[in-house]
Amino acid sequence: MLIAIDFDGTIVEHRYPQIGKERPFATETIRRLIADRHRIILWTLRKGRLLDEAVEWCRERGIEFYAINSSYPGEEIDGDTCRKIKYDIVIDDRNIGGLPDWGDIYNMIQRRITYQQYLIENITGTTLQKPSKKRWWQLSDKEK
């Protein structure tokens, strides 16, 4: 899976332009996602020296990104323009509902469940089953 991850507030606490303290288990979880063969993109508004510092901070903790602020390595970036990139999942502290714990994030990715499913499971205490797909030739109960 292609996973885009924000830096400030997500991997580290907000202290921009400084680098805040690591959020608990952030780098450990990212290293585990990389070991599981996910491609990790650092997607941040940092640029120049501040971006270099963030990349080096991660590198010192064993994180090598697949790409930085781009969809793939070597993709040209349009100057200072904020642009969209391609990803399957984005992990950002500005999500509706905030940022779950990194252990929960890893669990959701491994189980391929949504944040909504995760919240429902935690509120009800029951594990949701993925709905089974109907074969295209099967009639629904309403059609019979």
Image: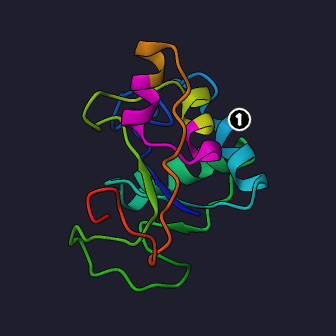
Q: Main secondary structure of the magenta part?
A: helix
Q: Position of residue 62 (x, y in %)?
A: 75, 47
Residue assigned mark 1: 28
Amino acid type, mark 1:
Glu
Q: Is residue 125 above or below residue 134?
A: above
Rendered residue at 62%/43% (across/down) = 111
Q: Is residue 48 above or below residue 25?
A: below
- Camera-side residue: 112 or 4? 112
Tell me the quadrant of the picture where the C terminus can be found: bottom left
Q: Position of residue 48 (x, y in %)?
A: 39, 61
Report the magenta residues as a range.
108-120
Tell me the quadrant of the picture where the N terminus can be found: bottom right
Instruction: Tell me if mark 1 has few (under 14), some (14-19) or many (20+) residues whose alpha carbon lies within 10 angstroms of its own.
Output: some
The extreme right residue here reads 35
Q: Is residue 40 above or below residue 95?
A: below
Rendered residue at 52%/24% (across/down) = 101
| 117 drawn magenta | yes
- Camera-side residue: 73 or 48? 73
- Camera-side residue: 133 or 139? 139
| 33 drawn magenta | no
